[in-house]
Amino acid sequence: MKYVIYIIQSLMLLLLTPLFMGIIKNLKASIRGYEACPVLQPYYNIAKLFEKGRVLSKSSSIITLIAPTLCLCACVTAAFMVPVFFNDGNPFVGNLFIIIFLLGIVKFFITLTGLDSASAFGGMGSSRELFISMIAEPVMFLTVAFLYMETKSLNIFAINTAVAGMAGFDVANCIAAMGFAVLLVAENARMPVDNPETHLELTMIHEAMILDTSGRDLALMELSSWIKLMVFVTIFINCFFPMGMTGAVAFVPVILSFIAYILKVLVILAVISLVECSMAKFRLFRVPELLSAAFSLSLVAIVINFF
Amino acid sequence: MIEILISVILISAIAMSGFRRARMLNRGFALQSLTIALLCLAKGYQTGEYHYYILFLLTLITKVVIIPLIISRSMVHSKLERETDMILSGSWSYIVTGIAVALSFIFLGNFSDYLFRVGCILIITGAILMMGRKKAITQMIGLLTMENGVVLFEISMVKMGSIIEFGIVFEMLILAMIMGIMIFNINKTFDTLNTDYLSNLKE
Amino acid sequence: MYMHDFLSVFFIVLIVITALPNVIYSFGYLEEYRKDYSLKYLWGMMALFILSMAGVVISADGVSFMIFWELMSVSSFFLVIFEHKKGENIKSGIMYFIMTHISGLLVMTMFILTAKFTGTYDFNVLTAGAANITDQQRLAILILALAGFGSKAGLVPLHAWLPKAHPAAPSNVSAMMSGIMLKIAIYGFIRVAFIFAKDVSVYFGVAVMLVGTITAIYAVINSLAQNDIKKLLAYSSSENIGMIFAVLGLALILRSLGLRSLSALALAAAMFHVLNHGIFKSLLFMSAGSVLFAAASKNMNELGGLYRKMKFASTCALVGTAAIAAVPPLNGFAGEILIYGSFIQALSAVRIPWIAMTILFCGIILALTGGGVVWASVKSFGMTYLGEPRSRKAEEVHEVPAAMKAGMAVLAGFAVLFGVFSPFIINLIYGWTSGDPAASAVGYEVTIVSAVLLLAVSALYLAGKMLSKKGVADEVRGTWACGFNDFKPYMEYSPDGFVQPGMRIFGNAAGYRKEVKVDGAVHTRARIKDVIEANVYLRVIKAVDYLAARIIKIHYGKIQIYVSYIFVSLIVSLILVLRFV
Amino acid sequence: MHINLMIAVFIAAISVSIIIKNIDVISYVNILGTVLLLILSVLIGFDVADRGHIFHFGTAVYIDSLSQIQLLIITTVSVMTALYSHKYIKGEYEENIISLTKAKVYFVLFQVFEFSMIFLCMSNNIMGMWIGLEATTLATAFLIGFSNSKLSLEAAWKYIIICSVGLAMGLVGIILFIYSLNSEINTSMLQWTYLLSWDKGFSKKVLMVAFTFIFVGIGTKAGIAPMHTWLSDGHSEAPSPISAMMSGILINLALYVIIRFYIIIRLADGLQNMRYLFIVFGCLSLIISTFSILKQTNYKRLLAFSSVENIGIMSLGFGFGGVLGVYGALLHSIVHAYGKSLLFLVSGNILNAYQTKRIGKIKCLIRTMPVNSVFLIIGILVITGTPPAASFFSELKILQNGFNNGEYLPAAILAFSLLIAFAGFVVTFMKMIFLNDGAEEYVRLEKDKENILPLVVAVALIVLISATFSSLLNPLINSAVEIICG
């Protein structure tokens, strides 16, 4: 029964992701003061794209054909391995490294697609993406180390229950959360590191790599990047703000924790859109400074707690 | 009687180290060998061993007659007149030999026998002659003087070493012959005997 | 007469797994050499090479270990200079031979010291544990072992031969050298450090870990900066070796602190990564060989777009690149999780602050290296196989013979197999390292995840098939790059450009200098050199040369001086003898 | 009985090469002579094996296993060089570089050289040993100056001067040695066996001075470091077969003579650390020779310096003492004899084909002279001590002995100089063999096929030694070690 709920909660996550994207667009529009598109617009976009035919470049290879499917499957599998609003321990699945390396598949295949279309923009996008993710690796390592040293386990379900058990916020948790937030922004190409909405050739990183995909592939790519963002957000919530998460297999507590989860997600989406409206995109060689700041934050978090 | 002979050897050794002309060196060497031969005769007469007489005859024939003959024959072909630029100039070589003689006397003080010390001195003069001169013939004479020194050294030390003496004498004879032929060849190819030209086998 | 404990069997399995596909691959690959080199010579040398490596692994005493070790060096030298037509192969071959001789001497001195302290060369007696070695003696043996085996494996100060020897050798040989020979050095180190020396001071473990980490970061930055595929792969072998030595160092630290089970886990992680690296690195070298075979060039500036005419070989190369970039279900990913996992578990278990800080520092550097490896592998695959061909060579590419494809396919299969079923293998190794075969180090999560992944991919593939039938058919047109449509091949991202951001940050580790020349058109070139080799090696060679020039002056040529040497040495030795004896 | 036969063979060979005019006949007789001597020495070997040591002509001739090893080396290497000089001299004679008399002189001196060495290692009388050494010097003096060029004459002159001075010092040492017995001296006193059984004690001071004189004097003949200067000139200018014999055998024999005296020295108490003489001079010759190898431009000089280096290794072996070190040194002397003569004969072939000794001028040997380059590679691998060859085991034993006896610095110097020598060898020869400047096309020289038989014999001997040194030859070497180590 427990595993049925796990599957349900992951399906809920997958279904709600386009909705959350619509919410972000609406929040940014309201902050900027113009009339936004309806919240369900992303669903329509995806549906429209699925009907469209694909235009393939003559210089592209099999990578462009298999990459979208692989990226989406990776993100879907990662989604199935993360506790969303119900967590009663899961011995089979949940190793934090495996989740992060699953999302690494997306990075690997998207960068290859960027190179596949033999255009300068694709090459530029993948080179910058790899540059940023190379410098972000240590931050990921430190965050996982922090969580392990706090809860003595690498399994995200166990981390969640352990963190839920701890009383209130201590300094190290906040600092580590801040570090992970920066990592989240860097990995998912949100504003300070990369502007998701722009199509200005020289500024886009994530968009440049999927510039040449069209039709069904574009839909898959869009979906996978959205799901990747939501998986990161869910990990962020479950590892650092676990209040309201239930372990009881009963209808009412599950609904209550679902509502709590939705509220937490809305808060984070608001913060993301606020950051995107107030900040301009960093120059490429200022991003390492941002990431080294995140690195020192998570380093300090570990040193405070455990040395 | 032996003291006089030893003094003659000593004087010839010091004199030879300063000579410039090879002919003088040759004569000096012959004189030295003659005195050694007489010394053997005196030793033989004194101790009554017969092998000293044989040694006397051998040294007389080889070192007084044959080897100087070889040296003079090779000198004639090479038109060698005098040792021009010596590494150790005349006066300096005298001084060095003098110091060497003094040192060896002091250092070997506890050896009562004069012969032993003169043997060492002859070896040292031979060495100085070889290292201080440039001409090949002078080096040859230096080497032969050193062998003479060893003979003297041997006479003073070992009473009954007949095989050693015969060994040395024959060896010196063959050595002189071979060096003579070599000097002849060097003279033919290099048409000089200055060993400076014999030093392009470097490093 | 021979060793048959788990360690030797494990490395014999590694040799078999890597050498067999290599032999299959060589049947195809060596056709190219038939016209100007004798193949009988190469096959003979390869057989000697493999046998000597197997000999090293199963030899049961120091002397036979040394014999096979030197045989391995000699045969690999003659393999490296196989293509003696090209001048630089000989120079790198000579440098390689001298460096292997250095490692041979160090290992020989180590065995002699062990024989001096314990009185025996026999491994079985040594494994039974010679109790009477003092701690200080054991440290001396281990330092020599680190220097000897490290120089053969390519740790930093003595690594300069690796990026020279591997590109010079024919690709099937460099695949075997990277895949197996470097691991033989690691086998030697494990046998000496873990089996003979029961326990050693923690400082040695820290030293090994630091050397390994420094090698890893140095090698990854250099591998990023390379334009020649085989040089890139050679540096990435050095990087993986660095990572393995870092984990071995960690295992040594944990053992000396008494955390037995964690140290066994770290050792299992190292041995598993040795197996993985053997597989995917040989696969990558084979794919580099097939590129060389097809396009007769290994400079990435001249390649590109090889995918069109080498479909099968490129897919195997894709599997190899994905494996080294730690992309899940494959074996690189399984190895790397275990390494990061053991680092983090060690971090929380160690109580001494300064050791924990060094472990943390090395963990961070290794994570950074992991990111660098992904970048280097994407560069090596992207620049050679994807996009438009950058030169005439890359256009007329002829198909690769079947034998080569078979060899690569076998290894690609192994990569997937060892990735998906990695928990079983890891537990097997952990069983040996921790002592009790029942213990299990890691859950069967990886297999479950790969099953789920397979399920998702096939489901989505079927959905895609159904959707595309009723939708509009695909069209094939030029690349849409925001409307600019006459793209030339040279406008593609070049290998130097691809890593230029990284080189701006980490460049001085690879001696990176950008040269801009303006004569009508602007030409930029990136200059890279092996920093350690340029500074350290040249200084050492200059010093030896200076000394040699001084000493050779002794033979001045003048006969008088030679005679004076005799008398001087006579007098000096007389004085010394009378004084001292 | 065998020894009389040996003398008979020698006299026959000498007379034939003087009387007969035809070069072919002379060289065949020469080869036959050396082969006969080899067979006889093997027979003597069997006698020595079962009787420990044999006397002949009363106690004048004394052969124990130590001199039996030297005997075997002499005869085997001279068979090789005789085979080689057959074609070598015929080639020179046909191109009338040398006259008939010169060729005849060559073969006479060759026989004299070989027999004086045999005489040396058989003589029980220490003065006989000295005379043997002197005879070899005189015999080889002309052989070095054989090609009558400026350089070879200069080398011959230096050789004869330095070696005679050295041997004079050696003679002084021998005389002091006898003097140190401080008792009435009779002719039998000079017998080595008599000295061995001397129990009335020596005067320590004089004995020390005597042994130093002997070591430095005869050390010049062995090519130990500061006195080795003649070796590099002599061996590079001498004809290849002669330099092969000198490098292979002669320097071993000089060391053999020093060891004979060292055995007696060891009996006297309080002289244990005389072995430091071996160690200090060994290290000196290692350092000087290996660094000079690096800067060589003439490959025959390079091989000569490598002989100096190997002598350094052997003297270190004896210096470290102990069974292992001495065993290693003896084994090393055998393998080095064969390996070095193989290398000299191959360099002779190369010199014959290319007419130049400069390393820079020889390019891409693998294509122009493939057969010779294979032998060259085998030679290099043997000399630098790669495993299958016995030289690896000998170096391993000497190093091990060095570490066991606690002399860490000399052992470190040994290891370091082995490395430098290996680097020098590989850099020079591998460049000669493989490096080509790609410009012109290399065609196989027809001279490559000449004179391959002696090389095959040399490699066969090396393989034989490497295979049998721990089984067949073991008793011979072990008994020699017992003589030295007591």
Image (tube, rainbow, N blue to C red):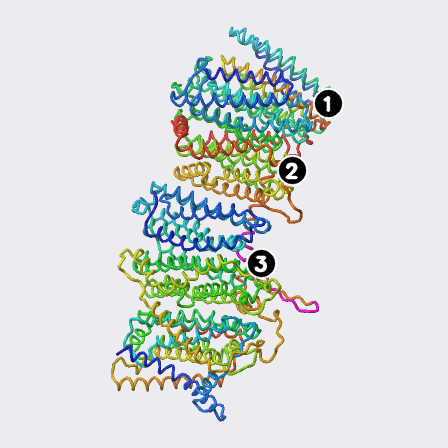
Q: Is residue D273 left or right of residue B22?
A: left
Q: Residues within 10 Å of mark 2 (few under 14, many from 20)?
A: some
Kindly report the distance in space between the C-alpha atoms of the residues bearing marks 3 and 2: 36 Å
Residue D372 in view, yes or no: yes
* Mark 3 vs mark 1: in front: 3
Tell me which amino acid carries mark 3: Ala
Q: Quadrant of residue C410?
A: bottom left
Q: Which residues are magenta?
A: C519-538
Q: Are marks 1 and 2 on the same chain?
A: no
> Circle 1 marks a residue in which chain?
B
Residue C154 seen in the current view: no
In 3D space, how far apart are the residues under numbered discs 3 and 1 (Cα atoms)?
70 Å
Image coordinates of residue C389 in percent, x first then y, are 59, 67
In the image: residue B86, left or right of residue C446: right
Badge 1: residue crowd in 10 Å (few <14, some 14–19, many ≥20): some
Residue A13: say if magenta: no
Secondary structure of the residue carrying tag 1 is: helix
Identify the element where label 3 is drawn: loop
Residue B78 is marked as: 1
Q: Name the amino acid, label 2.
A: Tyr
Determine which of the numbered discs, if any, sits on residue D354 in the image: 2
Q: Is residue C529 magenta?
A: yes
Q: How many marks?
A: 3
